[in-house]
Amino acid sequence: MSESASPTPPVGYKASPASEVEVLLEQIEEIEEERRTSYLELFFDLVFVFAITQIAALLLSDLSAGGFARSLLMLALVWWAWSGYAWTTTAIDVDSLLNRAGILAGAAAAFFMAFALPGAFGDDTLWFAFSYFAVRTIQVGLLTLGMRDDATYLRSALRLAPFFLLSPTLVVGGAWAGGDARLVLWGLAVAIDVVGAITAGGGEFRVSAAHFAERHALFVIIALGESLIAIGIGAADAHRDATLAATILVAFLGVAALWWAYFDFVAGAVEQALGRRTGRDRGHVARDLFTFAHFPLIAGIVLFAVAAKKVVAHSGDPLSGPGRFALGAAIVSLMLGLAAGRFRLIRKLSPERFAAAAVAVVATLLLTDVSALAVLGIVVAALAVALAVEAVRLREVRAAVRGGS
C-alpha cells in the first residue's frame, strides 16, 4: 500500500511505537479475557467425570496400602492425560474442523481408557494402556500442529513432545510386562512427565490466563461432583432415619467446605496472578500453580469422596483404618496443594489451613473407637472453623481479589 493510501490520523494525534504497542497489548488482553471454555471442551471433560468415578471405584475395591498406591498412580496418569489437553486447548483454535476432530478422537480414546481403568492391573491392562497411548499421542499431535504458525511456540512444543511420547510408551510396555515391572514402568512414566514439565516445559507456551484457570476450576468441580455422587451411592441402601439425615448433611457440608477452600478466593487469585505474567514467566506460573499444585487438590477431593462413602454407609460404627486414613489424607493433601500454590505466589503459608490439616490427622489417628459420623463431624467442623477464621483475617485480600485487583 502506498503512503498516500494510509488513513489520516486524527488532529493532534502523535503516533509512537510505544503507544501502538500499548494499544495492541490492551487489545490482546481484552481478547484473552473474553475467551472461555468451549462446549467442546466441556464435552471432553465429561469423559474425565467417568475416569474420576472409576478411580474412586478402584480404590474402594481395595483399601489396602497397595490399593491406595495403585489408585494414586492411576490418578496421576489420568491427570497428566487431562492436563496435556488443558495446555493444548488454551493454545490452539478449538473451532478448527481438524482440531475439533482431533479433540473428539482424544475424547473417544479417553472414554476407552476410563472404561478399562478398574481392570488396569488385571485383565484390562492392555485395553487401558493402548487407549492411554492414543489419548496422549493425539494430544501431542494437536499441540505441535497447532503451534506450527509460531516458531517460538513450536520449538517449545517440540522440546516437550519426546517426554510426552515416551511416558505413554512406557505405559504400554508396563502393560505387556505385567507384575511388579508394570508398577515400576508406570511410575517411571509419571516421573518422566514431571521431569519433562520441569525441564522442557520451561519454554514459552501460548497460555490464555482466563481460559486456563477456568479449565482447572472445572476439573475441581468434576472431582467435587464425584464426592457428591459417592455420598448418594453410599446412602442408597442405608436405613432412612435421623442418623442417616445427619450423616448426609455433615458429608455434604464437608464437600461444601472443600468447595469454599478453593472457590472463595483462591481460584480468582491464581487466575489474576497468571494474567499478570507474560511470556515465559506465564508458562512457568501456569505449570507450577495448575499442573503441579492442582494435582494434590484433586487427590484430596477423591480421597474425601472415598471416606465420605464409607462414613455414610456405616455412620454408627467406628470408621475403619483405611477410611480414617482416606479422610485424614484428603484434608492434608488438599491443604498442601493450596499451601504450595500460595507459597509459590507470595512466599507465605496459611496457618488456619495447616491447623485444619493437623486436627484431621490427630482425629483420624486417635479416634479409633468413635463413630464414623463423629470423626467426620470433627474434621468438617475444624475445616469450617479454619476457613471462617481465614475469611475474617484476609477479608481485605478477599475483597481485593473479588474486585479484580
Image: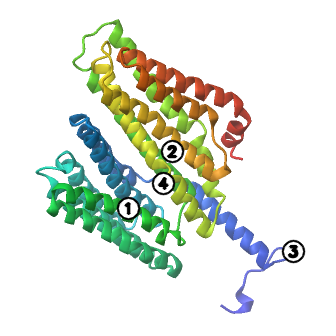
Residue occupying the far top of the picture: 242
Give the Cα separation between the discs numbered 4 and 3. 52 Å
Residue at 89% in and 73% down: 12
The amino acid beneath tag 1 is Ala
Residue 174 locus on image (x, y percent): 21, 62
- Decide: marks 2, 1 in contact (CB < 8 A)? no
Residue occupying the far bottom of the picture: 2
Viewer-closest of 65 and 101: 65
Is the residue 97 above or below the residue 70 in the image? below
Residue at 63% in and 38% down: 350
The amino acid beneath tag 2 is Gly
Q: Which residue is mark 3?
A: 11
First of labels 3, 2 by sequence position: 3
First of labels 4, 3 by sequence position: 3
Give the Cα separation between the discs numbered 1 and 3. 61 Å
First of labels 4, 1 by sequence position: 1
Q: Nearer the viewer, mark 1 or mark 3?
A: 1
Picture quadrant of residue 223: top left
Q: Residues within 10 Å of mark 3 (few under 14, many from 20)?
A: few
- Decide: marks 4, 3 in contact (CB < 8 A)? no
Residue 278 locus on image (x, y percent): 63, 65
First of labels 1, 3 by sequence position: 3
Viewer-closest of 124 and 105: 124
Q: Residues within 10 Å of mark 4 (few under 14, many from 20)?
A: many
Q: Nearer the viewer, mark 2 or mark 1?
A: 1
Q: Which residue is mark 2?
A: 337
The amino acid beneath tag 3 is Val
Is the residue 332 above or below the residue 111 in the image? above
First of labels 2, 1 by sequence position: 1
The answer, for residue 93, to whether it is visible in the render is no
Picture quadrant of residue 232: top left
Q: Which residue is mark 1?
A: 191
